[in-house]
Structure formats: structure tokens, C-alpha cells
């Protein structure tokens, strides 16, 4: 037992030294703001909001949603026993760098922090997050799909975040391009997608899609849809990890996109860039494989206006086996309680209750800020029957996104996610440059991650 404890301490020390690479945070926004002090002192100052009940104990929160001020105000109006002191310290790399600094320094973290689900294991293994199952998490479990709950859960019923939004993946496409090139229905399988891509290319049409090197989380999600299990990890045995990045399913997906790239049927532009968005607006791409938060992002980036208005529709993600459909997810965030919280019970009340009231959830989905995971919204007629402006009146939630979310089973994330994303991005870029096949990229990833994991103190199996 003593040997295992020493090994875990060494592993945690190594993990805490990982440089958190800056990956684009899905369904997030840019924003400034200062930092909030840790603890639930009744005199927290420097908040970006005003208290409704200033004499109540206060909990510090970091969060980046565009409508966080409204969400915090709604919470504070509804809770006389606790008030939120909120600040936006940035999103993506900006926030995660501050989180890692606070973990290493053992001070400086807020009581509650918004994190993407794929980062939870990285911080949990460092002892930075509180198990919410001890503070009433099961009371809200029924509000979410099994997949959404699995994404924030650890071993033996532990829970390290309260889910808020997600990103079930679908196929966004241009109806004008499909009509022009005789595609009467959106592809339902990836084989049909490739065939349609070849058809449009042969007719001199635009690129059918894009395999961006800078979206490794999407690439991983598509591999998982095929049946890949990149990592098998449990917080019950934190020093053990199974890595399987060169299995046939992972290889098949990388080779699939490598072939489309080689045939110049899809592009290789980094997504979320000005050039890429310009291409989307200008009709350079016939499809966009992305998550449920994409319409809001695209609208905010100027897509769906002018020449690119009234031409968008959405369909379920193509399947590898139409008789056995699999849904997958890209993005999604949760509120976690940090181990530096002074009053963990009170902090848990905030984490489980923030962005959970009907008014905040409605504001989030009606303004396309989030795709909510709360079943009270997913089962509501207003949400299901909403006619999307971006999709020209299509009931996209009912037709595509709600079924996808409810069928999603969850992903087994590992503490190596950030490092893995960086390596997958590098290998995807080599594929796009014609320097590697998908098979070679997968082999490199397996060797690289195995070596890295062992250097961090993990016992690795395949």
C-alpha cells in the first residue's frame, strides 16, 4: 500500500507539470475579467456582479459563458442562503493556465470553476476537484442523459462536475450546393458522404467539407463513433491506463479523411479562423461536421447573413453502420467545486444550482449560447418545436439534436487528454500535408502517448 501511495504522489507531481496546450474551447466566448479569491468569506470583493443578499455567505466562481452575468444574477435572486461572486478569467488556455497555476501553488483557485468535461480527469488526478456525490449530486442526476452524466463521473459513483451544455455532432450542409449538384438527400452513411464528395468534385463544385488539423477533439469523437476507445481510465486505479490509438477503428477514420484530403474533395483549413469562416460564408464548403453549438458560433461569426442566409440545413451525423447508429459528442462544460473551496457544501450548492433555473436555461438556448443538457429543456415543447432561424425554420432540435444527445453514451476521458490533443493535432497536420497516411499517424500516436504516459508514472496496457 505504501509503495502505491508513493507512486501516486509521483504521478500527480508529474501530471501537475504538464503544460496545458491552448485548444479552442467549444461553445465558449472570449472575455476578460479579473480573478476571484478562493474561500467562502462573506467579504469577497472584486466581483463582476452585484449581490442581491450581501449578508449571505459568498462563493467565488470562474465562468466564461457570454450570459454569465445574467445567470449569476438569476442565481443570486433565488438564493438567500448563498451568493455568487463571479469573474471571467478567460476561456480555453487562458483559464486552464490559471487553474493549473492555482493547483501548483495550492492557492488562488475559486470555489467553483467552469471546466470542459474532457479536462475533468486531468484535474481530478491532481486532487483539485471535489466529489459532488457527497453533496447531493444524485438529486440532479435524473435531469441528464446517461451520456452527459458519464462525462462528468469517475469511479464508484464519484461526480466531478455538474453538466450544463453539450455538443451532439450532426451534419450541417448547404441546401443550395446540394441542389445544384443533384444531391437530393443528405448522406446517411460515411460511404455516401465520400460518394457525394467525389460527385461534387467531379462536377467542378466546392470542397465537400474540411478536415481541420486544429480540431483534435472532433477527430477523436469521430473515431469513437466508429468504435474506437482511445483510453480506458478509472479514478479507482489512477496509476493505470490503457492506450489504444492504433486500433483498426482509429486507423479507418484517419485513413478515411486522409483519402478525402488526397483526392482534394475536402479542405484542410484550420477551423475557427477568419479564412475558414470566409470560406463558409462564400460557399467554399458544402458541409460542416460539427456540434449542436455550431449554429450559435456560426451566427456570431457572421454566417447565415447576406449571400449565406437561407441556405443551411442540418441532418443526423452519417453512420458507419446504418443498422447500428452511434451518436458522439464534441464539447460541453460543467461546474466543478475545487478542493480549495472553504465551504465545500455551500460551493456544491452553487455548482449544482448555477445555470439550472428555467430562466437561465431558456436564455442560453434561445440566444444560441448553449445546447442545454437539462432534460427539463430537452423534453419541453418550446425547445423541441423551436424553428431555427439559422436553419430556415427547420425544427433542428426535434429532428436531430435531441435524439442525438439522448442516444449519446459518454466518453471515457483520461488525464492525458490535453497532451493527446496536441499530438493528434500534429499528426492530423502531417496527414493534411501529405506527409503521412492515417495508418502511420495512428502508429505514431500510439508510440508517443505510450512513452509519454510511462514517463509520467502510469502503468500502460494496450
Image (tube, rainbow, N blue to C red):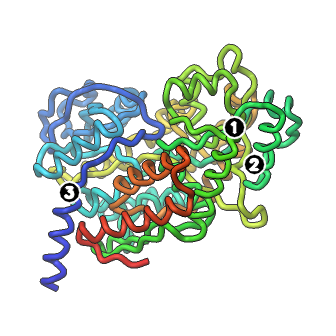
Give the spatial CA distance, label 3 vs label 1. Answer: 39 Å
Q: Secondary structure at mark 1?
A: strand
Evaluate whether residue 93 shows in this view. yes
Q: Residue at x 40, y 63 (%)?
A: 153
> In the displayed structure, does residue 283 sit left or right of residue 452?
right
Label 3, on which residue?
16
- Contact, CB < 8 Å: mark 1 with mark 2? yes
The N terminus lies in which quarter of the figure?
Answer: bottom left
Q: Position of residue 456 (x, y in %)?
A: 24, 66
* Left or right of 291 on screen, residue 393: right
Viewer-closest of 317 and 48: 317
Q: Position of residue 104 (x, y in %)?
A: 14, 52
Q: Nearer the viewer, residue 299 or 376?
A: 299
Image point (26%, 63%), residue name: 125
Point out the residue furthest to the bottom here. Answer: 1
Which residue appears farthest toward the top when viewing the image?
306
Quadrant occupied by the C terminus: bottom left
The spot of residue 418 in percent (x, y) is 35, 53
Residue 381 visible? The answer is no
Secondary structure found at label 3: helix
Q: Pick whichever, 413 or 137, lies toward us.
A: 413
Q: Find disc 1 in the rendering and name its residue.
A: 287
Q: Residue 58 appears in which quarter of the rendering?
A: top left
Observer-nearest of 451 and 4: 451
Q: Is residue 72 above or below residue 13?
A: above
Report the disc number at residue 193. 2
What secondary structure is marked by label 2?
Answer: helix
Real-space Cα separation, disc 3 to disc 2, in angstroms? 42 Å
Amino acid at each position: 500500500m505504501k509503495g502505491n501511495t508513493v507512486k501516486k504522489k509521483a504521478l500527480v507531481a508529474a501530471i501537475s507539470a504538464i503544460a496545458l496546450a491552448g485548444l479552442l474551447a467549444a461553445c465558449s466566448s472570449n472575455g476578460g475579467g479579473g480573478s476571484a479569491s478562493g474561500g467562502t468569506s462573506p467579504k469577497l470583493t472584486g466581483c463582476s456582479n452585484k449581490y442581491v443578499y450581501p449578508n449571505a455567505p459568498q462563493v467565488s466562481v470562474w465562468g466564461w459563458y457570454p450570459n454569465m452575468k445574467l445567470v449569476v444574477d438569476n442565481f443570486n435572486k433565488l438564493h438567500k442562503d448563498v451568493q455568487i461572486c463571479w469573474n471571467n478569467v478567460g476561456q480555453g488556455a487562458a483559464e486552464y493556465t490559471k487553474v493549473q497555476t492555482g493547483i501548483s501553488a495550492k492557492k488562488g483557485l475559486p470555489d467553483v470553476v467552469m471546466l470542459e468535461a474532457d479536462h475533468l480527469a486531468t484535474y481530478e488526478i491532481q486532487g483539485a476537484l471535489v466529489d459532488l456525490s457527497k453533496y447531493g449530486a444524485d438529486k440532479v442526476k435524473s435531469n441528464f442523459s446517461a451520456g452527459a452524466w458519464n462525462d462528468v463521473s469517475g469511479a464508484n459513483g464519484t461526480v466531478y462536475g455538474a453538466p450544463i451544455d453539450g455538443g451532439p455532432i450532426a451534419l450541417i450542409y448547404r441546401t443550395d450546393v446540394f441542389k445544384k449538384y443533384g444531391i437530393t438527400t443528405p448522406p446517411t452513411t460515411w460511404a455516401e458522404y465520400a460518394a457525394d464528395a467525389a460527385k461534387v468534385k467531379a462536377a467542378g463544385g466546392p470542397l465537400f467539407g474540411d478536415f481541420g488539423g486544429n480540431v483534435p477533439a472532433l477527430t477523436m469523437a469521430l473515431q469513437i463513433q466508429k468504435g474506437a476507445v482511445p483510453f480506458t481510465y478509472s479514478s479507482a486505479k489512477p496509476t493505470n491506463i490503457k492506450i489504444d490509438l492504433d486500433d483498426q477503428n482509429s486507423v479507418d477514420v484517419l485513413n478515411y479523411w486522409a483519402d478525402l484530403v488526397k483526392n482534394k474533395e475536402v479542405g484542410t483549413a484550420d477551423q475557427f479562423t477568419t479564412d475558414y469562416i470566409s470560406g463558409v460564408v462564400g460557399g467554399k464548403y458544402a458541409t460542416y461536421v460539427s456540434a449542436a453549438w455550431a449554429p450559435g458560433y456560426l451566427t456570431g461569426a457572421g454566417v447565415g447573413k447576406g449571400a449565406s442566409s437561407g441556405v443551411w440545413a442540418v441532418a443526423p451525423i452519417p453512420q458507419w453502420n446504418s443498422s447500428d447508429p452511434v451518436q458522439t459528442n464534441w464539447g460541453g462544460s460543467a461546474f466543478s467545486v475545487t478542493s480549495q473551496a472553504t465551504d465545500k457544501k455551500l460551493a456544491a450548492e452553487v455548482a449544482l444550482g448555477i445555470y439550472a433555473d428555467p430562466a437561465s436555461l431558456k436564455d442560453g438556448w434561445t440566444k444560441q449560447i448553449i445546447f442545454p443538457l437539462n432534460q427539463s429543456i430537452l423534453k419541453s415543447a418550446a425547445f423541441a418545436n423551436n424553428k431555427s432561424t439559422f436553419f430556415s425554420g427547420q425544427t433542428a432540435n426535434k429532428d436531430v439534436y435531441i435524439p442525438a444527445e439522448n442516444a449519446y453514451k459518454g466518453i471515457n476521458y483520461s488525464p492525458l487528454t490535453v497532451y493527446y490533443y496536441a499530438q493528434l493535432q500534429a499528426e492530423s497536420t502531417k496527414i493534411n500535408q501529405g506527409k503521412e497516411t492515417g495508418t502511420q499517424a495512428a502508429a505514431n500516436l500510439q508510440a508517443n502517448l505510450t512513452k509519454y504516459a510511462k514517463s509520467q508514472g502510469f502503468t500502460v496496457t494496450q
